[in-house]
Image (tube, rainbow, N blue to C red):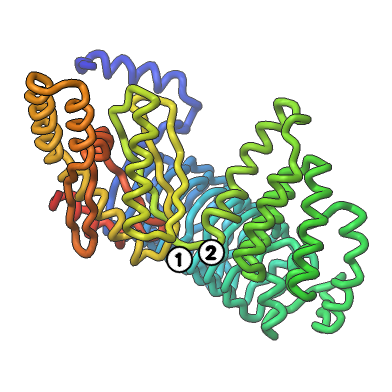
Amino acid sequence: MNFNDEDIKTAIDIYNKVRPQGKDVFGEKISLSDCDFDENYDTSIIHKSSFFKCRFINTPFIGVSSAYSNYKNCLFKECKTQNTNFTFCNFSLSCIYGSENYTNWIANDFSYSMFEGSQIENIFFEGTAFYQATFNNAKLTNLSFKHCCFDSALFVNTKIENIDFSNIELLLCNFENANIINSKFTIIMLLNNFGLLQIYMNSNDIEIISGQNNIMTKEDVLYKIKKMVPLFWSNHDFFPLCNIYLNLYDIDIAYKVLLECLEISIKDLDFEQINHLCKLAVYSHKLSIKYLNQVYKFIDKTIDTSAFNYSDTKKYLRCNDEIKYLLQINPKQQPQLYLSLKTDINDAEEIGCLLKSIERTLKEMDDNINPLYKIQKHSPYEIILIICAATTTLMPIAQFFYYMNGSIKSGQDLLINSKKGKNQKQKSENNNDEMHSKQEMLKRKKTFTFGKFEISYTTEEVKSLQLINDITCIIDEHDTNTSKDILEKAKSNS
C-alpha cells in the first residue's frame, strides 16, 4: 500500500487525539546496541523494542508497556521499576544489579520472560508475577520477595544464593540440578516443585521454615513429610504424594503408587494433574525408560474417551500430546530437532509416500531415532518432524536434509530418462513388457552422499522427496545460535 505524506499526517493527528492522555500506547519500536541510558531516558516510548549490550543506569521503568521487548546482554544498575509489563521479554545474559540495601522492583509482570544465563543481585521484588519465567543457568543472589508468585518457572542449572522464598507462592517450578546455597523454603515447597526435595535430601544449605521463622531439622522435616501422606491421599492431591514416594521410598513401590494416583486422576477427569504427574515421573529421573513407557500405556489403556463430552475430549487431547512426548518420544529429555518441511502436496496419497521416504532416510542415518510427525492442514502442506537425540546426532541429520533438499532436484533427470524409456518401450513392447519396464524403473536408484551418510533412493522415493520445496530447522531453543553457522553452510553447500 502506498500513502502520501498528507495521509500519514492525518493518521498521526487522529491517533494523538484518541490515545490516552500522556501515554503513547504504541510507543516506538527501537533497535539499539551498545548504548547508555540514564535517569532522564523516557522508557514510555519503548514498545516491542530491542536492546543489545546496552546499559541502563538509574533508569526508571514506571508504568511502561515493555512487553515482547529484548534486553539481551544488557546491564541494569539501580533501576527502579513499578507497574511495568515485562511479559515475554528476553533478559538473557543480562546483569540486573541493585544497591547493597536493595533496589525496589514493584508490581511488575515478568510472566513468560527469559533470564537465561542472567545475573540478578540485590533486588527487592514486591507484588510481581513470574508465571512460566525461565531462569535456566542464571545466578540469583541476595534477592528479597514479598507478595510474589512463581508458577511453572524454570530454575534448571541455576545458582541460588541467599534468597528467602518462604513467604511467597512457589508452585510446579523446576529446580533440576540447581545449586542452592543458604536459602529458605517451606515443606510444602519441597513437595510441590520439581527437583527441590531431591536437592534438599543431598544438601545442608537449604533451611526449611515452619511457623514464625522456626528452622526445622532435616529429621523433623522428613518425619512430618511422611506423616502428611494420608492428607494428600484423601484430598486427591497426588503430586506431593508421588513426589514423596519417588524420593523417600523404594522405586517399585513408588511406581505402583504413581499408577494408583493416575487411575484415580483419570476417574476424576483431572487431566491437569495427570500431566503434572507424568512430568514428575520424567523430571525426577528415578524411573527407567521401560517404566515410563508402561506409564503411558497404562494411561492410554485406562482412559475411555467414548464417555467424554466435547470439553473433556479437548482437555484430554491437549494432555495426551504432551504426556506422549514426555513418556514415549523423549523420556530422556534429550535435545530436540524441529524440521519444518514445506511441500507442494495436493493429494493425500502423496503424504504417505513422502513420509515413508523420510522415515527410511532417518532409519538409515540412525536406527534408534523415533520421530514425531505433525501434519499441518493449511496449504501448502507443512510437515513438522520432532527428533530427539544428542546434538552430535541431530546436527548431521539437519545438514543432510538441507543438502538433500538442494540436491534432490537432480533426480528430475532420473525421472525424465525413465519416462523417455517408458514411452519408447510402449511403442515396441506388449503389456507384459510394459509392466516389466515399470518394475525396472522402480528399481533404478539415485544415491546421495554427504559426509559419512550414503543413501540410495528409488525413482518413486526421489519423486516424493521432490515435493519438499523448503526446509526450516531449529535444534533446541537453546542451541539455535551455536548451530546457526553450520546450518547456513549446509544450506549454501546444497
Towards the viewer: 47 or 393: 393
Tell whether 222 sits left or right of 8: right
Mark 1 Cα shell of 10 Å, populated few (<14), some (14-19), many (≥20): many
Residue at left offset 57%, top offset 48% = 109
Which of the 4 image quarters holds residue 443? top left
Q: Is residue 223 visible?
A: yes
Q: Amino acid at mark 1?
A: Ser
Q: Amino acid at mark 2?
A: Lys
Figure check: 445 above or below 9: below
Towards the viewer: 488 or 339: 339
| Rendered-image quadrant of the N terminus | top left
Residue at left offset 45%, top offset 42% = 373
Q: In x, y percent, where is residue 491? A: 19, 49
Sequence-wise first label, 1 or 2: 1
Label 2 SS: loop
Front disc: 1 or 2 = 2
Label 1 SS: loop
Q: Is residue 91 visible?
A: no
Tell whether 223 sits left or right of 133: right
Residue at left offset 12%, top offset 40% = 410
Q: In x, y percent, where is residue 315? A: 68, 36
Which of the 4 image quarters holds residue 272? top right
Figure check: 438 above or below 138: above
Tag 1 residue:
118
Tag 2 residue:
332
Q: In x, y percent, where is residue 70? A: 39, 50
Q: How many marks?
A: 2
